[in-house]
């Protein structure tokens, strides 16, 4: 056989169907429970729409990429294909996705869990179909109180699966099942082919790799409902642990702003560009203020024009340092319902929803 014939024969062999036996599924064996948890560096969170490849990832287990042709969404036993879903009216929302644990590493004392600092948050345009329309298409009545959601990332053995439910009222109101992110097909690590989008609520509700939904009068049970993602009914303190029944599910995001851009060094009297983002569980941000004197006085930042309900608002301030030395800049946001970002965050045993004033230091010379 000459080289060309050999290559042709090899190509034909590669294309020939192998019928004799079913090859074992080709996949890696996952070691440990955390396939990919990664946050975005804060200084890169400067875009209104966070680029897909920079968007933080939080996965409890390894996802499997389904064959889009055989993939089905099971809704109370009714099977819907991607083509069925695409026939429904399109829905779109630009909103913030933040992990409830974002900022956990900043709580004192140190808390167990993924040590997220600033970047387990992003803002994206999510497109797909309304949960409301999907349920109607599957003939699900509006009576039930909860919607249970299941992803395809079920772990083996005793590792608790990420099974969740959400109140039907929220699901029917503004939730979307998205198959696109920022105008591109939803990436696998963000839940392809279909994920839940829950505007204004923390990331634990945003089920990825959704394959099954059922309606029920009871919330879902299990570790990720009864133990994780709960907020104390009474304020706690370090060392105080509440039982699940003394807590309620984490839902709406707290008002929060971060500084993404500030010079490390500058000179007295020279204008510096200070930038950041702000968001809340409330539909919009009313104002962002910056202080260079420890919170005694505040300067109002300019809000960017781009906004949408529960999207973040970019802001900037032309700031002129009036003295030399190390100056600490603080930022605080106020949302459209009047909630003001607090100086310190509410301590809670899981370190959720950290939203204390963010500060950066600037070295000012003469
Ligand atoms: N099926 C499934 N959905 C999931 C998770 C998961 O582990 N499995 N993680 C949740 C958590 S805790 C967060 S914060 C978001 C993160 O979404 P992202 O990875 O697209 O940023 O997905 C949520 N949806
Ligand atoms: Mo999360």
Image: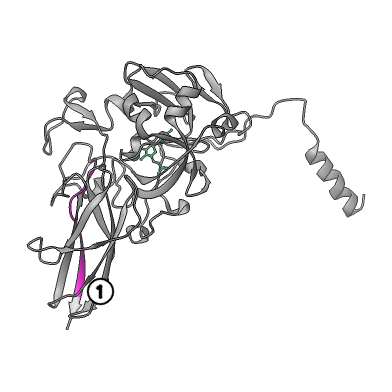
Image position of 247 (left or right of 208): left
Name the foreground residue: 163 vs 17. Answer: 163
Q: Does 357 lie within the magenta span?
A: yes
- Quadrant in which the C terminus is drawn: bottom left
Region rendered in magenta: 352-363
Indicate the position of residue 20 as horizontal and vertical percent values. 77, 25
Nearest the viewer among 186 and 118 is 186
* Beta carbon of the mark 1 residue lies under 8 A of ligand 1: no
Determine which residue is flagged by label 1: 272
Q: Quadrant of residue 34?
A: top left
Instruction: Give the x, y percent position of residue 223.
Output: 32, 26
Q: Residue at x 32, y 17 (%)?
A: 218
Where in the image, quadrant-wise, is ligand 2 located? Answer: top left
The answer to which of 108 and 329 lies nearer the viewer is 329
Farthest-out residue, bottom: 366
Classify residue 172 by image quadrant. Answer: top left
Tell me the residue at 31%/40% (across/down): 200
Which residue appears at 58% of the width and 33% of the height?
66
What secondary structure is found at the residue carrying circle 1?
Answer: strand
Q: Is residue 136 above or below residue 292?
A: above
Task: Tell which residue pokes out farthest to the front in this image.
Answer: 89
């Amino acid at each position: 056989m000459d080289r060309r014939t050999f290559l042709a024969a090899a190509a034909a062999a590669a294309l020939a169907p192998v019928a004799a036996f079913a090859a074992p599924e080709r996949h890696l064996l996952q070691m440990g429970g955390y396939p990919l948890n990664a946050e975005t560096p804060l200084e890169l969170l400067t875009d209104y729409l966070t680029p897909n490849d920079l968007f933080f990832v939080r996965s409890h287990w390894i996802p499997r990429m389904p064959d889009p042709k055989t993939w089905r969404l099971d809704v109370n036993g009714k099977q819907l294909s991607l083509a069925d879903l695409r026939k429904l009216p399109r829905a779109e929302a630009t909103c913030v996705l933040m992990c409830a644990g974002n900022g956990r590493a900043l709580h004192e004392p140190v808390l167990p869990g993924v040590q997220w600092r600033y970047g387990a948050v992003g803002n994206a345009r999510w497109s797909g179909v309304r949960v409301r329309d999907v349920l109607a298409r599957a003939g699900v009545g509006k009576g039930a109180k909860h919607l249970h959601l299941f992803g395809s990332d079920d772990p083996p053995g005793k590792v608790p699966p990420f099974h969740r439910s959400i109140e039907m009222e929220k699901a029917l109101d503004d939730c979307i099942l998205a198959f696109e992110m920022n105008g591109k097909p939803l990436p696998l690590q963000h839940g392809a082919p279909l994920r839940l989008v829950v505007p204004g609520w923390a990331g634990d509700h945003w089920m990825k790799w959704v394959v099954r939904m059922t309606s029920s009068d009871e919330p879902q049970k299990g570790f990720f409902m009864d133990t994780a993602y709960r907020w104390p009914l009474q304020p706690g303190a370090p060392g105080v642990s509440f039982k699940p029944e003394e807590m309620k599910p984490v839902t709406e995001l707290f008002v929060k702003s971060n500084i993404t851009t500030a010079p490390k060094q500058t000179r007295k009297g020279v204008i510096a560009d200070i930038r950041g983002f702000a968001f809340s569980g409330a539909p919009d941000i009313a104002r962002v203020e910056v202080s260079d004197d420890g919170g005694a006085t505040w300067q109002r930042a300019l809000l960017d024009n781009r906004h949408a309900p529960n999207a973040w608002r970019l802001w900037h301030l032309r700031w002129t340092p009036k003295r030399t030395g190390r100056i600490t800049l603080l930022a605080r946001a106020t949302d459209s319902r009047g909630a003001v970002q607090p100086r310190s965050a509410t301590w809670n045993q899981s370190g959720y929803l950290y939203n204390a004033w963010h500060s950066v230091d600037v070295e000012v010379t003469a």
